[in-house]
Image (cartoon, rainbow, N blue to C red):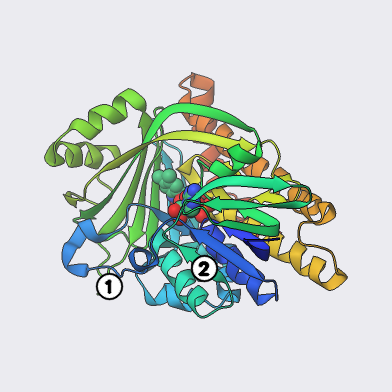
């Protein structure tokens, strides 16, 4: 076609999911284009330890062992590990309204860690560095502004008017995916009427390489362990989900009043909260696309599903999508099918939709269980947690599932 830059596969969105997918596809020998709205120079910036709590990125991910294996197979995990990260050996979850408490320990699973907390930007930076020396044609600093389809041809339009086309376009442009809307794939959405407050804190006691999570009727509070380059283990990333009115009240407090409430909410497990970074709050909404695919088009990552952050599974679900797409497109390459062939896309959707939905339903159930205050539910929570905590093999099975090693 005239004046259209053509590829086998075009990925839109160079976040954690899109850049991993583009890299993996290019290694399979496909001609891949990747378009990212952000500037690569900004995305490649390294942290500045002198800034203390302010320097940690508010968005972090609890990367499961399965996601770690995927990033290792792409050759970027070592680079991620050269940056700031914290492997956590333990996780403690408890009911703020009762006596139920459950502990997970990597040692019981004969694993080195339950997962690794990594700042999202470290993963993006490692992937971008690998993309720069790959065959992927990366266009950065320009937004995708439209979608076009003419007969069997399809593609995107950039803000500068240029048109790009491909046999398969994958939208990894995040939760508010414009491409999903332009192509016309509807979503099912649940509004939680909640907001997540995210920030970084320094605590008086070290976190002990443990992820702490306390449930209350208004939402969970997580202290996720972080580590500085110097090995200081007094920093945690906070994700505090609260009903919208309560979140607004907490956001309006000054730092002293906020840290005092935070200390109480986590029951002073880590002693005083000594410093807090700037706070961010965003509305929590669970979204799931009814279909992940259309002709020559697929959704991946948050563009297909956004999940309540209570179990930190968002990025891991996205990496599950990447794994499935890489496997299906490698099979297409071997069998000579076009990457946008209906059969290839149908297999991808079949593999991912059910699994993502099951995880979203489990999160919803969990949230509802803790949101209710009726006595039988409270009893169930407390006895259930104590019972599960004493049941080694079942508990370890659940932990293995959460680590992405369940199958
Ligand atoms: C509070 C919070 C806590 C979380 N904690 C965890 C956790 O502990 N563990 C976990 O696994 N997950 C967690 N998540 C989820 C995780 O951050 C997301 O699942 C993940 O970032 C999704 O990656 P993505 O690449 O699909 O989308 P994004 O990270 O949103 O990336 C989309 C990319 O597309 C680009 N883009 C968008 N529109 C355009 C356009 N028109 N043109 C060009 N480029 C465009 C953007 O610039 C961006 O780089 C959390 C999320 C939240 C909100």
Question: In the figure, residue 87 lies in which quadrant?
Answer: bottom left
Q: Residue furthest front?
A: 2
Please provide percent x and percent y for residue 394: 64, 51
Along the viewing direction, whichever of 159 and 373 lies nearer the viewer? 159
* Labels 2 and 1: the sequence-earlier one: 2
Instruction: Determine whether 57 is above or below 70 in the image.
Output: above
Report the disc number at residue 231: 1
Instruction: Determine whether 110 is above or below 185 in the image.
Output: below
Along the viewing direction, whichever of 166 and 380 lies nearer the viewer? 166
Question: In the figure, residue 229 lies in which quadrant?
Answer: bottom left
Residue at mark 2 to residue at mark 1: CA–CA distance: 35 Å
Q: Indicate left or right for 371 with 361 as reference.
A: left
Name the residue carrying label 2.
Answer: 138
Task: Tell me the element at label 2.
Answer: strand
Disc 2 vs disc 1: which is toward the camera?
A: 2
Please provide percent x and percent y for residue 328: 76, 62
Please provide percent x and percent y for residue 240: 35, 40
């Amino acid at each position: 076609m005239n004046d259209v830059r053509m590829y086998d596969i075009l990925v839109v969105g160079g976040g954690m999911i899109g850049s991993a997918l583009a890299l993996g596809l290019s290694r399979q020998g496909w001609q891949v284009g990747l378009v990212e709205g952000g500037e690569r120079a900004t995305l490649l910036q390294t942290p500045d330890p002198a800034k203390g709590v302010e320097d940690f990125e508010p968005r972090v991910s609890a990367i499961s062992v399965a996601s770690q294996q995927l990033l290792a197979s792409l050759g970027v995990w070592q680079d991620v590990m050269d940056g700031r990260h914290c492997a956590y050996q333990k996780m403690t979850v408890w009911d703020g309204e009762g006596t139920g408490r459950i502990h997970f320990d990597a040692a019981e699973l004969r694993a080195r860690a339950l997962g690794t907390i990594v700042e999202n930007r470290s993963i993006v930076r490692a992937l971008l560095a690998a993309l720069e020396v790959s065959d992927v044609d990366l266009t950065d600093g320009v937004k995708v502004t439209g979608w076009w389809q003419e007969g069997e041809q399809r593609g995107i339009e950039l803000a500068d008017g240029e048109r790009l086309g491909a046999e398969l376009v994958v939208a990894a442009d995040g939760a508010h995916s414009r491409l999903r809307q332009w192509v016309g794939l509807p979503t099912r959405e649940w509004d939680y009427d909640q907001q997540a407050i995210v920030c970084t804190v320094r605590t008086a006691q070290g976190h002990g390489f443990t992820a702490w999570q306390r449930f209350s009727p208004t939402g969970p509070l997580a202290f996720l362990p972080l580590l500085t380059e110097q090995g200081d283990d007094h920093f945690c990333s906070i994700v505090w989900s609260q009903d919208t009115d309560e979140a607004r009240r907490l956001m309006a407090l000054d730092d002293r009043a906020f840290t005092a409430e935070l200390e109480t909410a986590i029951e002073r497990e880590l002693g005083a909260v000594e410093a807090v970074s700037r706070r961010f709050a965003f509305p929590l909404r669970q979204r799931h696309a009814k279909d992940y695919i259309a002709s020559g088009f697929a959704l991946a990552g948050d563009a297909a599903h956004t999940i309540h952050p209570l179990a930190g599974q968002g990025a891991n679900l996205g990496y599950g999508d990447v794994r499935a797409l890489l496997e299906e497109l490698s099979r297409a390459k071997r069998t000579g099918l076009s990457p946008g062939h209906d059969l290839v896309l149908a297999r991808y959707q079949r593999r991912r939709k059910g699994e993502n939905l099951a995880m979203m339903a489990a999160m919803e159930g969990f949230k509802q269980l803790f949101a209710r205050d009726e006595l039988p539910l409270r009893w169930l929570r407390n006895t259930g947690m104590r019972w599960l905590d004493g049941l080694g093999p079942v508990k370890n099975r659940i932990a293995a599932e959460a680590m992405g090693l369940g199958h």
